[in-house]
Amino acid sequence: RASQVTVLGLGDMGSAIARTFLDRGHRTTVWNRTASKALPLVDAGATAAATAAEAAAASPLVVVCLLDGAAVDKVLNAVDAAVAGKVLVNLTSGSPQQARANDRWAGARGAEYLDGKIMGDPPYVGTPHVMFPFSGSRTAFEAHGPMLRELGTVVYHGEDAGSAAVEFMAQVAVGYEILIGFLHTLRLVQAEGVDVAEFAERAANNVAALPPLLTSIGNAVRAGEYPPDLGPLKVQAALMDDLISHRESIGVEAVRMREVKGLMDRRIADGFGAQGFSSLFELLAKS
Ligand code: NDP
């Protein structure tokens, strides 16, 4: 069913979103600070508005996808009362605090607010390969969920507008924490004269075992009961010594390995040497 939608912000991501809406037959109004970026979309059937406020006034659903929170503040200030009675969907990356502030801003102008975050690349928008956590107004999500699902794989995280950003920040952190370790390990591999690309291909097969492990660690942490995942800690700790000394012998960063070993030693000293890697969670207190 064709709907009307406005997209504010036509960078790589905003353009991909607007194009997806156009491809699905929706009447799409677009606006961008640099107006020329609207031209390819106008060629594809979009209507370009002269100002952000005009664009927002054109549709019941107003999607914002800009560089950052500062850009959102600037554009929303220009839109101001034009958002009354609309559903405002902000897909700009940012913090839970920013999302909650936008929610209050929208509420004060008689708009409903949905915050969404994007995990994936612009060319994949419109396919299930892009993940969109959403949170905020439940009625808005129920009304516009079918259309938002056209953008990718959508999960609704509840009425707190900040929840989608919490999910986004945590998921992005998982990626960076794993990948910086991977980069350090490529240093080690290269220093040992192994082809890094071939190693990476074998490592990709190796980490195929990670998804079920993440799930079982999540369950162990929730239950507070720790099976010997990756083996008992007292066996793993001995291996860690070898991993650390190998890295240090060729001048490769071992700080995270030493962190892991330190946690294992503490856990073993506390009498939990038969438990697994997941039990280190007990030592990771909120600082
Ligand atoms: P781009 O740099 O391609 O586009 C940025 C957009 O923000 C442009 O429309 C730009 O306008 C606008 N903008 C920046 N500052 C201002 C301002 N002060 N006032 C008005 N408009 C402003 O970024 P993307 O489209 O790639 O990213 C958009 C959002 O999507 C970001 O929050 C990003 O984190 C997120 N995202 C992007 C991914 C990606 O791979 N590209 C992946 C996942 C999330 P102008 O054209 O005039 O400069």
Image (cartoon, helix red, strand yellow):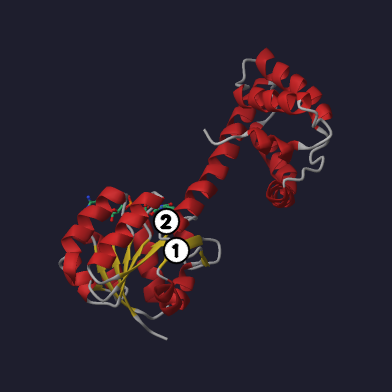
Pick whichever of labels 1 and 2 is earlier in the sequence. 1
- Say which amino acid is labelled 1: Ser
* Ligand 1 neighbours mark 1 (CB distance < 8 Å): no
Provide the secondary structure element on which disc 1 rests: strand
Q: Are there few (<14), some (14-19), or many (20+) residues within 10 Å of tag 2?
A: many
Residue 64: x percent and y percent? Answer: 31, 62
Q: Are there few (<14), some (14-19), or many (20+) residues within 10 Å of tag 1?
A: many
Q: Is residue 167 above or below residue 155?
A: above
Residue 153: x percent and y percent? Answer: 53, 66
Residue at the image point whose x is 80% and y is 37% from the top: 275
User: Is 188 in front, or is 156?
Assistant: 156
Residue under label 1, please give it: 135
The residue sitting at the bottom extreme is 1
Residue at the image point whose x is 68% and y is 13% from the top: 249
Residue 54 position by quadrant = bottom left
Residue 59: x percent and y percent? Answer: 27, 77
- Left or right of 286? Residue 271 is right
User: Is 214 in front, or is 202?
Assistant: 214
User: How far is disc 1 from disc 2 in space, using C-alphas?
Assistant: 7 Å
Residue 234 position by quadrant = top right
The residue sitting at the front extreme is 270
Residue 162 shows which numbered tag?
Answer: 2
Please report contact status of discs 1 and 2: CB closer than 8 Å, yes or no: yes
Provide the secondary structure element on which disc 2 rests: loop
Q: Is residue 208 above or below residue 272?
A: below
User: Is 199 in front, or is 170?
Assistant: 170
Residue at the image point whose x is 28% and y is 66% from the top: 107
Residue at the image point whose x is 47% and y is 73% from the top: 150
- Left or right of 232? Residue 132 is left
Residue 80 in view, yes or no = yes
Residue 39 in view, yes or no = no
